[in-house]
Image (spheres, rainbow, N blue to C red):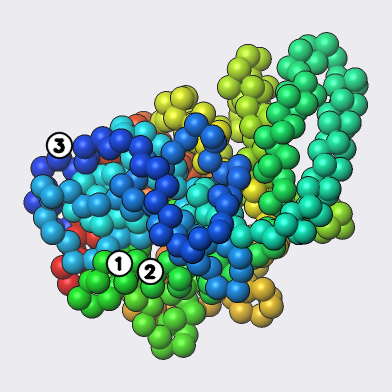
Amino acid sequence: MVMDALRFQSSFTSSSVAASSLLSQPRPPFSSLQLGRVGSSPAIGSVSANETCTADELHYVPVPNSDWRAALWRYLPSSKAPKRRHPLLLLSGIASNAFTYDLSPECSFARFMSGSGFDTWILELRGAGFSSLCVDTESRKEEQRIVSDLLENLINVSEKMENVLDEGFKILGLQDRLSKRVGDFKDRFELIPRYNWDFDNYLEEDIPSAIEYVRAQTKSKDGKLLAIGHSMGGMLLYAMLSRCGLKGMDSGLASVTTIASTLDYSSSGTFLKYLLPVKEPAQALNVLALPIDTMLEMAHPLIFRPPYVLSWLTTNISAPQMMDPEVIEKLVLNSLCPVPAKLLYQLATSVDKGGLRDRTGSFYYKDHISTTNVPILALAGDWDLVCPPDAVYETVKLIPEHLATFKVFGSPGGPHYGHQDMISGRTARSEIYPLVIQFLQRHDQS
């Protein structure tokens, strides 16, 4: 089996922080501290109304060439932990906000990192979480008209669907729930015409702006950051290293950790391949964005309530018995946001031969990852249906051997790790967090 030959370094230096002190003390919710420019309204729909930022600070940074401001959640380092040289930047996956790293005090990746002494920042890319947008009045009126028409069509379609379903499904009340929530959804949908960016926009605008902001706030001696990316967040870090390596530029990163990430899904059994048939119809219909948050909120009773018609969807998130049901439910209801069609179209190239390409279609990101000079820890879960271990290895095998550290978590007898489990699973804090800390510590000191 190819996994037997994978490179994995186990000689980490031992952490000087006691295990009991690695998790920082629970912190009260922190209301929005808007440090960016004035006159923006929050991006509606990515965080439910009863949720607040649970970090110590919430910062904003303008995104170039747009009306958006990205949000940065900051978790201050524990005074009881060793002082670290570099700040830590966390990047979430597609359609995700900062809650993916801080779902609860018991499984908070961000709090564990700050409790270990790292000045920890979670970036919410444009359109996610507390990111904000400036919208002029006339544009907003036109967007409201478009949204009203869209919602009316959605209600009509849902009513027709219920008419053709048997009585057992009609009791689920799809049309009734949509009608009751139409006001909430209208606010969310009004932003969809503004979702007009792709992966390269994140790479060229959001990420550099956030890195510069964190660098200015933290003032590390060498100006470098440590970075961790989950899913698409890891893809962004790989792509950044690929571009910088090709151009001979300094990435500004002291180390990179990727969790369930790859630049090439083409040879793997990822379930993402089954989503490709929706690409052409979406393009033909000129769909601007996919409101994943709204869709899953509507499907919520079908996933988490009897008769559990759509409960199988959770297997794409977590391995059986790995995450508490209430934590998965919070993830579904509070951590998602709409996804621009442009972003989906570009990410779809990652399942084609050669892997992820830039927007021109001529630059294959994985072809240049071998030029990086940054140490990389790549983690995979044995039960991950989204980014299986063989997909992760497709990128890892191209990284210079002395820089690559690879680990597949999970064992035949369990526990198993799905796509979110390495961040929020029951055993992540004991099996995975310390491993990440040791890798960060090694490269924080070098």
Image position, residue 157 (x, y; %) = 87, 32
Whether residue 392 is visible here, answered yes or no, is: no
User: In this figure, which residue is indicated by the disc labeled 1?
Assistant: 217
Q: Relative to residue 435, is residue 61 depicted above or below?
A: below
Three-letter code, disc 1? Gln
Instruction: Answer whether labels 2 and 1 touch (C-beta < 8 Å).
Output: yes
* Residue mark closest to the camera, 3 vs 1: 1
Residue at x 58% of width, y 22% of height: 304
First along the sequence among labels 3 and 1: 3
Q: Secondary structure at mark 1?
A: helix
Which of pointers 3 and 2 indicates the residue nearer the eye?
2
The percent position of residue 334, horizontal first and vertical second, equals: 52, 37
State the image coordinates of residue 328 (x, y, percent, origin top left): 49, 31
Q: Amino acid at mark 3?
A: Ser
Percent position (x, y) of residue 418?
46, 40
> 10 Å neighbourhood of mark 2: few (<14), some, or many (≥20)?
some
Q: In the image shown, does 71 or 319 lie closer to the viewer?
A: 71
- Taking 25 as reference, is 83 above or below it? below
**Residue at 83% across / 48% down in the picture?**
145
Residue matched to label 2? 213
Please report whichever mark, 3 or 2, sits nearer to the chain's N-terminal start: 3
Q: Are marks 3 and 2 in contact (CB under 8 Å)?
A: no
Q: Residue at x 67, y 43 (%)?
A: 188
Quadrant holding the C terminus: bottom left
Name the disc covering residue 20, or none. 3
Residue 50 in sight from this viewpoint: yes
Q: Are marks 3 and 1 in contact (CB under 8 Å)?
A: no
Look at the numbered disc 2 and give the secondary structure of its residue.
Answer: helix
